[in-house]
Image: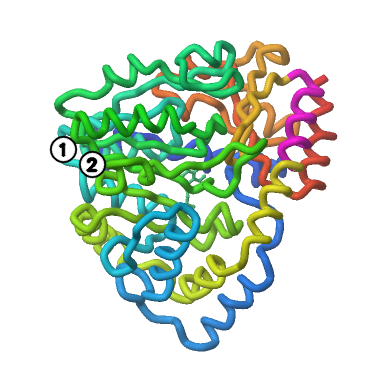
Amino acid sequence: MQQSRTSYRTQQFPESIIREMTRVALEVGAINLSQGYPDFPVAEPIKQAAMRAIAEEWNQYSVTWGLKPLREAIAQHYRHRYEMDVDADRNVVVCCGATEAMIAAMLGVVNPGDEVILFEPFYESYIPNCHITQSTPRFVSLRPPVNGAANGLAAPHEWWFDPEELRRAFTPRTKAIILNTPHNPTGKVFNRAELELIAELCQAHDVIAITDEIYEFITYDGARHIPLATLPGMAERTITISGMSKTFSVTGWRLGYAVAAEDLMVGVRKAHDFISVCAATPLQVAAIAMLNIGDAYFVQLQHDYHRRRALALDMLREVGFQPFVPQGAYYIMADFSAISAEDDLRFGMRMAKEIGVACVPGSPFFSRPEQARTIVRFAFCKKDETLLQARERLQRLR
Ligand SMILES: Cc1ncc(COP(=O)(O)O)c(C=O)c1O
């Protein structure tokens, strides 16, 4: 038998199922509620800023860390919103999306053979990142809010984890924990008590936290996003990652950033430099306009997402899904066992091809597919009319 010519590392993970579902949706003309990108227009001042930057010849490589005025705007954002002490020269790097920031962070601090703790379900890209860095993921389950108060930390409506399971996940080989809050796919927003426990364990075991806070501005019902780095003792051991994709609906612009203590940042910046050199320069110029857009934008963003969440929850409940209500981000995980006995992959494919609405099967978010056999995920970052059209098509399930 001929040996594969691809690398051992890339053989260990499949292509993204989320992006595969987008390809299927395009092929069969399904409404795409699979991949998390908005279908509504970007704010006019942001588009104008990007076009102006190109016309004004901001068209060459930027400093690898990111344009200085953008790093300053990012530092100012962290000072203003979260009272974090961030220096543009020492603590910030601009990357091609949070996706690149995450792999740069892992390459920057994780060694082969290290263990990395992940909450499960998890955002798909963390597993390939573990394979690429030759580290071993250790999973801690997030449990649905049926017995919500069970861990003594979460409210009854919140997804929760068992503190003992988290304690056990920390071993002498643990180098890092990845914390995604607000969380994709569950919509969990980690509360202060949970973050305090994570912080305590990180400090007790000398572990670095890498946080993915890409949905920091999309929360519901008064849930408040708290960056882990703001907890006592955590600023020096946290790499905080966020970006423009979700907050400003520019997922195709590939703009993200990481913020960390200088000694950690050295590793992240080196990895970033040799992965991508820099993020697109004219779009970095436009990103300054994003961060200076004014508070009204963020208030409107929350308002719009509350409405979209309500539309999406209604349309799913109406045809028999049991949705988990998200506290943050723009996804709904839903149990479909009352509608179909198929597994998530078959059901997801039939949804796209026969019903005309694409969603993501649950299994790519779990380490063992059997944990997600009756679960799919819907993205609701869409125009009201797109959601209403999806609602109409979902009637075909009845
Ligand atoms: C949790 C999470 N992190 C990161 C990303 C990707 O962010 P970016 O577009 O900045 O690479 C996504 C996109 O869906 C996400 O859900």
Image-based side of 41 in relation to 260, left or right: right
| Disc 1/disc 2 C-alpha distance (Å) | 6 Å
Decide which of 25, 384 is in the foreground and name it.
384
Asked if residue 149 is positioned above or below residue 112 in the image, the reply reads above
**In the depicted structure, whether residue 257 falls above or below residue 49:** above
Could you say whether the residue bearing mark 2 is in a helix, strand or loop?
A: loop
Residue at point 67% right, 36% down? Answer: 221
- The residue at which mark 1 appears reads as 112
Is any atom of residue 213 visible in this view? yes
Q: Nearer the viewer, residue 176 or 316?
A: 176
Residue 270 falls left or right of residue 318? left
Magenta residues, as a range? 308-320
At x 19% / y 35%, what residue is drawn? 206
Residue 2 x %, y %: 23, 34
Front-most of 45 and 367? Answer: 45
Is the Cβ of the residue at disc 1 closer than 8 Å to that at disc 2? yes
Please state the horizontal and vertical placement of residue 155, each as a whole percent of the image.
56, 21
Q: Residues within 10 Å of mark 1 (few under 14, many from 20)?
A: few
Residue identified by numbered label 2: 133
Please tell me which of labels 1 and 2 falls first in the chain: 1
Query: Which of the two residues, 23 or 94, is positioned nearer the viewer here?
Result: 94
Q: Tell me: is circle 1 under 8 Å from ligand 1.
A: no
Q: Amino acid at mark 1?
A: Pro
Q: Outermost residue, bottom direction?
A: 56
- Quadrant where the image shows the C terminus: top right
The prevailing secondary structure element of the residues shown in magenta is helix
